[in-house]
Amino acid sequence: MSDTFTLPDLGEGLTEAQLVRWLVAVGDTIAVDAPVAEVETAKAMVEVPSPYGGVVTELHGEPGGTVQVGEPLITVGRPAAATYAEEERAGSGNVLIGYGTSAQTNGRRRRRRPAGLRTVVLDRPRTQSPIVRKLARERGVDLTGITGTGTDGLITRTDVERATAPRPDGDDRTGLGIRERVPLRGMRKAIATTLSRSRREIPEATTWVDADATALVELRESLSGTGLLALVARFVVAGLARFPDLNARVDDDEIVQFDGVNLGIATQAERGLVVPVVRRADRLSARELDPEIRRVVSTARDGAAPEAPGTFTLNNYGVFGVDGSAAIINHPEVAILGMGRIVPKPWVVDGQIVPRRMTQLSLVFDHRVCDGGTAAGFLRFVADAVENPLSALADL
């Protein structure tokens, strides 16, 4: 007898997930609730536990492929003890390559599970799928000569097919050769969907200003444990209290303004752009914002989903060494503030040209919720706080 476990409902209206890697292999004995696969949804990376215990007899799907909710994930057979008992009665049974059966004792054969089994498996080429191994045998591919493109170097079916595929003639439109085709799925697909919807639905406008951040940098250097991003985040939250039009969303013919700020922090993670959220950032001081920002960014880079929907996003693209950007609004929010790198530049102060630490602030906003005067007022408020941070913090 066997049981087939299908991909469960992942919540939040999600209907599919990308299979990142298997955590078990055919022949493994698993317990109830043991994690069997790591999958990536549009929200996060999660481990899927099995509701059945026993021996894994089949893995449905290849790493890198998409599994729909309700489709088979793994098949689990009868408990290992029963399988071993049958093998005892039948004789030597299946033997792991490199190991023989034990000597007969008291008229019975004793089967020993070799020590270091996991090490033996890991010494082989990094593929856990019998389908991939079968395909490699059929096509005469030596798996030891393939570099896997799956998670942690796992060899996928695509890797084997690519190793035996003829060189493409090229792209018909450009006449160039095609180096690789990258499926748009998982987190990358979710990002593409959100950004495309933002561009399609939101009539956005952009405004920007150069700000003298010299005093801000000096203040940061005097404050132990409080970073520049936390200080700017505090100014942003205070600005939204004065310009609530930008802390909102549009629902059909209604503008919904929020009482409180869930501040999103645009973050570049290994699997793409993510926006972890600091819940109720309006209740936190700059000193309190700093560790909270670091915490949510760290968990997001580890694959966790945002802990709450955001109402406004702060984007520090200066970490990439650029001065400015017309960012895309994180739908269904209505505005995003960007901050460029802080670099020394000549600046006029009291009629004299002097070196100052300058940054560019840009605001992209939904023109449906406000006009340029409101957007400029908010941006100027943040810029003034950046230029005079001590006064701004004293007033907050």
Image (spheres, rainbow, N blue to C red):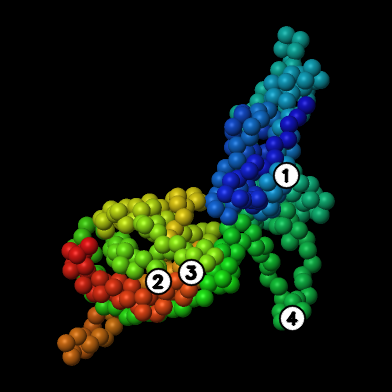
Tag 4 secondary structure: loop
Which sits earlier in the primary sequence, circle 3 or circle 4?
4
Instruction: Give x and y (percent) for residue 269.
Output: 49, 59
Question: Which residue was labeled with disc 2?
Answer: 338
Instruction: Give x and y (percent) for residue 115.
Output: 60, 29
In the figure, residue 35 lies in which quadrant?
Answer: top right
C-alpha separation, residue under disc 2 versus residue under disc 1 = 42 Å
Three-letter amino acid code of the residue under disc 1: Glu
C-alpha separation, residue under disc 3 versus residue under disc 4 = 32 Å
In the image, residue 186 sits, relative to residue 340, either above or below, namely above
Question: Which residue was labeled with disc 1?
Answer: 71
Q: Residues within 10 Å of mark 2 (few under 14, many from 20)?
A: many
Three-letter amino acid code of the residue under disc 3: Ile
Q: Is mark 1 in CB contact (under 8 Å) with mark 3? A: no
C-alpha separation, residue under disc 2 versus residue under disc 4 = 37 Å
Question: On the picture, is 346 further left or further right than 39?
Answer: left
